[in-house]
Image (cartoon, rainbow, N blue to C red):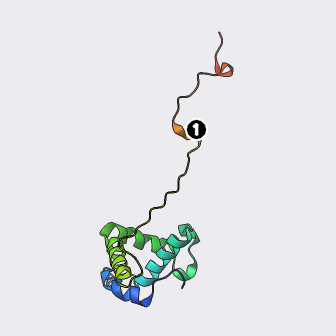
Amino acid sequence: MRHGLTDEQWHAIEDLFPEPAVTGRPPANPRQMLDAMIWLNNTGAKWRDLPRELGAWQTVFKHFDRWNKDGTLQAVVTCLTQLAIENGDLDNNLWCVDGTILRAHHCAAGGAKKGIRTSQMITL
């Protein structure tokens, strides 16, 4: 898969994921869930547009929310960043920030509204 993890990346992070519960439904594959999150991030698609072969979007979102709250995703990013630096794929001294500017429409500036229109005035 173009947007997924390599085997080397997966082996570096597979121990970071919490153990699945013993009861209930069979657990979702954490690699598949992470690959789905990477696909969503790289394509910019909406959750509901996730291809079915990557899993149900509700399941992927549930894992994303849980892993985000418990710090698992931060640990994954830290580990993969370190792996990329060690492999020479990322220069630790060079970081780029996107400087794109999005201008708000003039009505979003919060300016004061003009007075009451004459068509809205009540005449006695």
Instruction: Decide which of 89, 61 is in the foreground and name it.
Output: 89
Left or right side of 101 for 86: left
In this view, the residue farthest toward the top is 124
Alpha-carbon neighbours of circle 1 within 10 Å: few (<14), some, or many (≥20)?
Answer: few
Residue 18, position as x, y percentages in the image: 31, 79
The quarter of the image holding the C terminus is top right
In depth, the one of 9 and 25 nearer the eye is: 9
Percent x, y for residue 93? Answer: 35, 71
Q: What residue does disc 1 label?
A: 107
Going 56% across and 28% down the picture, which residue do you hit? 113
**Count of marks overlaid on the render:** 1
User: Residue 44's image quarter?
Assistant: bottom right
Q: Residue at x 52, y 76 (%)?
A: 39
Can residue 29 be seen in the rendering of this structure?
Answer: no
**Residue 9 drawn above or below residue 68:** below
Q: Residue at left 55%, top 51%?
A: 102
Q: Residue furthest front?
A: 93
Residue 86, percent from left and from top: 34, 83
Which one is in front, 83 or 32? 83
Instruction: Please say whether residue 11 is visible from this viewpoint.
Output: yes
Q: Secondary structure at mark 1?
A: helix
Amino acid type, callout 1: Cys
Left or right of residue 50, residue 60 in this image:
left
In the rendered image, the quadrant that contains the N terminus is: bottom right
Report the residue at 47% width, 80% height from top: 35
Residue 52, given in percent of the width and then of the height, sits at: 57, 79
34 sits to left or right of 116: left
- The reply, left or right, for residue 106 in relation to residue 13 is right
Image-quadrant location for residue 108: top right
